[in-house]
Image (spheres, grey):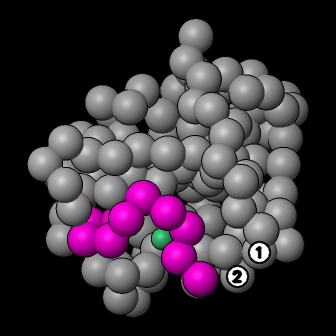
Amino acid sequence: MRDEIVAHARESAPQECCGLLLGDEDVVRRVLRCRNVHPTPETRYVIDQAQVFDAFRQSRDFDRELVAIYHSHPRSPAYPSPTDRAEAQWPEAGYVLVSLRTESPEIYAYRIEQHAVREIPLVEP
Ligand SMILES: [Zn+2]
């Protein structure tokens, strides 16, 4: 799962990539690449809402299946930016950040609640 996210980040650089990590509560089973539709994708991201809606429609219980939202920071650390914190809309989901600023990419998961950031483990089956 980490390798898939890193691959997506590298293919998208210098733009930020984004997507959904789907699974069961805290366990990630699937990486769903999404389009970054933000007008300045080098420094910001917005997931294509049509893809989120499709994933929602195909899921029996989307709240349970949506483990995390991921995006990349091509040049900055793997930590939620002030914008990431302000725009975090899903307190139930994790936010996974991958940074390409170092040779071996850093990847961390967080919970963002009311602008407060807490690191959480990234669980694979
Ligand atoms: Zn960000």
Image check: 18 left or right of 81?
left
- Point out residue 39 in the picture as x, y percentages from the top left corner: 39, 89
- Point out residue 26 in the picture as x, y percentages from the top left corner: 73, 27
Taking depth in this image into account, of 13 and 50 the one nearest to the observer is 13
Which of pointers 2 and 1 lies earlier in the amino acid sequence? 2
* Above or below for 7 versus 41: above
Q: Are marks 2 and 1 in contact (CB under 8 Å)?
A: yes
Dot 2, how many residues are within 10 Å of its Cα: few (below 14), some (14-19), or many (20+)? Answer: some
The response on whether ligand 1 sits within 8 Å of label 1 is no
Residue 114 visible:
yes
Q: Secondary structure at mark 1?
A: loop
Reading the image, the residue beneath label 1 is: 115
Part of the protein shown in magenta: 73-82
Q: Secondary structure at mark 2?
A: helix
Q: Amino acid at mark 2?
A: Ala
* Above or below for 98 versus 125: below
Q: Amino acid at mark 1?
A: His
* Above or below for 60 versus 110: above
Q: Quadrant of the N terminus?
A: top left
- Residue that lies at the very extreme toward the bottom in this rendered image: 39
Q: Residue at x 60, y 62 (%)?
A: 50
Reading the image, the residue beneath label 2 is: 86
In the figure, residue 114 lies in which quadrant? bottom right
Select label 2 or label 1 by which is in front: 1
Mostly what secondary structure, the magenta segment?
A: loop
Q: Quadrant of the C terminus?
A: top right
Q: CA distance from mark 2 to mark 1?
A: 6 Å
Dot 1, how many residues are within 10 Å of its Cα: few (below 14), some (14-19), or many (20+)? Answer: some
Q: Residue at x 43, y 80 (%)?
A: 44
Taking depth in this image into account, of 77 and 66 the one nearest to the observer is 77
In the figure, residue 53 lies in which quadrant? bottom right
